[in-house]
Amino acid sequence: MTPTTSPHSPAVTLETLRANIAAIERRIAAACARAGRPTDAVRLLPVTKTVDEATLRLAYAAGVRQMGENKAQEAYGKWQAMRDLADLRWCVIGHLQTNKAKLVAQCAAEFHALDSLRVAEALERRLQAQGRSLDVLVQVNTSGEASKFGLPPQDVLPFMRQLPAFSALRVRGLMTLALNAPDPARVRQCFVLLRQLRTQLQQDLAWGAQLHELSMGMSGDFEWAIEEGATIVRIGQAIFGARPAPAAATPPAQAGDRPSPG
Ligand SMILES: *Cc1c(COP(=O)(O)O)cnc(C)c1O
């Protein structure tokens, strides 16, 4: 989704966070019911990019045990700052450059945006060095927009065939960002495409049964995603409030809550 230009308001209270999370959980449950799916078929991944540490600690107090960050550096910094919260899982959900693979290999429990062999190789090397493994999802560009990362749908099967060579990567499924458009039918089509792709991979790959996850749906479109089969929804603004506009626009109101560029 396009970040809004609303002012950043990090000073949400614990009560507000609890209420926002409860409201999202009710909407998830309702969407599951409409789709004839059990409520526990969908995992809520709160997206915490640009949200300051104090607010994240409140979210932890409200019961949040996993946080999604789109930038490796920001994920790493927050992981370091909050290592006292030992059961908090960090999920990196945005495009990764190979020179940041080390950070992800250190701090992340999940990576949702694998889309090249170069990144797979870089992660594998760093993970092996650390004796760790990582749950990964392959990002697919289901909208066809040039601005979006991810593999074109037709490239996903040949890409997947290469992945068993990377023993530290546990490939769990697919991720996408839908078209940001007013027409619900076109948004849904992105989710349908990801689900169909997973079904095809499950049939075509000997190890396809482990491709369970569909990470799709954000604040503006998660109910449609659930109706189309999402197993993970990535929700930021509906929990933490509107984000500041990106760097080119006005600087954030609060110092220290944004990563340095790159
Ligand atoms: C920011 C982000 C989200 C969450 O978007 P909201 O509109 O805040 O819910 C989901 N996925 C990715 C990859 C993101 O970068």
Image (tube, grey):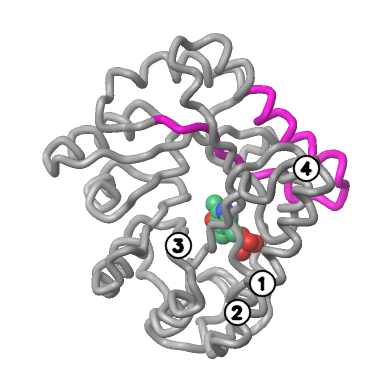
**Secondary structure beneath label 2:** helix
Q: Does ligand 1 reach within 8 Å of label 4's beta carbon?
A: no
Circle 4 sits on which residue? 227
Q: Looking at the picture, which amino acid does disc 3 mark? A: Met
Question: Relative to 116, does residue 182 appear above or below in the rendering?
Answer: below
Whether pointer 4 and pointer 2 mark residues with C-beta atoms closer than 8 Å, the reply is no
Question: Relative to 185, does residue 104 appear above or below in the rendering?
Answer: below
Q: Marks 3 and 4, how far apart in space? A: 23 Å
Question: Relative to 45, does residue 7 appear above or below in the rendering?
Answer: below
Whether pointer 1 and pointer 2 mark residues with C-beta atoms closer than 8 Å, the reply is yes
Q: Looking at the picture, which amino acid does disc 1 mark? A: Ala
253 or 13, which lies in front? 13
Circle 2 sits on which residue? 18
Q: Marks 4 and 2, how far apart in space? A: 25 Å
Quarter residue 38 falls in: top right
The span shown in magenta is 171-197
Residue at 67% across, 63% down: 25
Whether pointer 3 and pointer 2 mark residues with C-beta atoms closer than 8 Å, the reply is no
Horizontally, residue 200 falls left or right of residue 173, namely: right
Circle 1 sits on which residue? 22
Horizontally, residue 108 falls left or right of residue 156, namely: left
